[in-house]
Image (cartoon, helix red, strand yellow):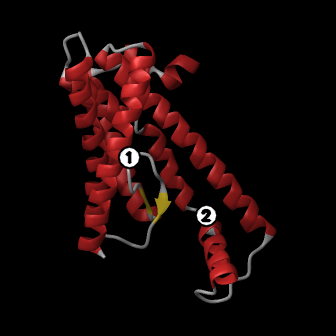
Amino acid sequence: MFKKLFNPFTHIAGIRSLFWGVKIILITSILGYFLNIHFPDVISVKSVPSFPFLYHVLQSFSNWIIISLILITISLIFSKSKIRIIDIFGTQALARFPYLLATFTGIPKSPQVFSQYMLYKYLGTGDPVEITTLDITITIFIILFSLLLTIWMIALMYNAFKVSSNIKGTKSIVLFIVGLIISMVISTLITNQLILIYS
């Protein structure tokens, strides 16, 4: 069960992983639209004001495409094996499943209340907000839950890269981290442009 949760890519790749992965990304976009959750880079989860549905779709799909293209480039340069591009696209799409679950963190309103409370108390911005112990508890739970989902997704992304590129050991870890950092920078720039367009 542990292996299936963190490395299902030895059993599912190619067209099959691409099919299910694209469906997951699309459903994530839909839920993000209704629950006001977005993904400003390839691994971040944040609440967002009401944005058009197309914003969520473009953001979710661009995050996937960016990390896939970066990892494909790294694989073609550093791997001694034959690289199947569809495997990297498919497994990276499927690896984004934890963020489908992350969209449900937009259901409770406690984090928004907590954020407004902190802004008013420490920065003097906004209106006075009353906060309860329940709000604080729910906010902490959501932060921890989101962190666990992020760790899970990064593990899935790494294992997808390792299996698809056939790069192993320390080399695979270093190359993945480099690819992830580059992808985060590029995806953040794209999100900033999307916000300018749709705000």
Q: Residue at x 62, y 72 (%)?
A: 115
76 or 9, nearer to the observer: 76
Q: Tell me where residue 151 sits by quadrant.
A: top right
Q: Residue at x 26, y 35 (%)?
A: 70
Q: Residue 16 at x, y = what percent? A: 27, 24
Q: Is residue 1 in sight in this rendering?
A: no
Q: Is residue 119 in sight in this rendering?
A: yes
Q: Around disc 2, counting alpha carbons within 10 Å, would you say few (fewer than 14), some (14 to 19), or many (20 or more)?
A: some
Could you say whether the residue bearing mark 2 is in a helix, strand or loop?
loop
Q: Residue furthest bottom?
A: 127
Tell me the residue that label 2 is attached to.
108
Q: Tell me where residue 77 sits by quadrant.
A: top left
- The image shows residue 109, relative to residue 28, as above or below, that is below
> The C terminus is located in which quarter?
bottom left
Q: Is residue 98 left or right of residue 197?
A: right
Q: How many marks?
A: 2
Tell me the residue that label 1 is attached to.
42
128 or 168, nearer to the observer: 168
Q: Around disc 1, counting alpha carbons within 10 Å, would you say few (fewer than 14), some (14 to 19), or many (20 or more)?
A: many
Which badge, 2 or 1, comes first in the chain's sequence? 1
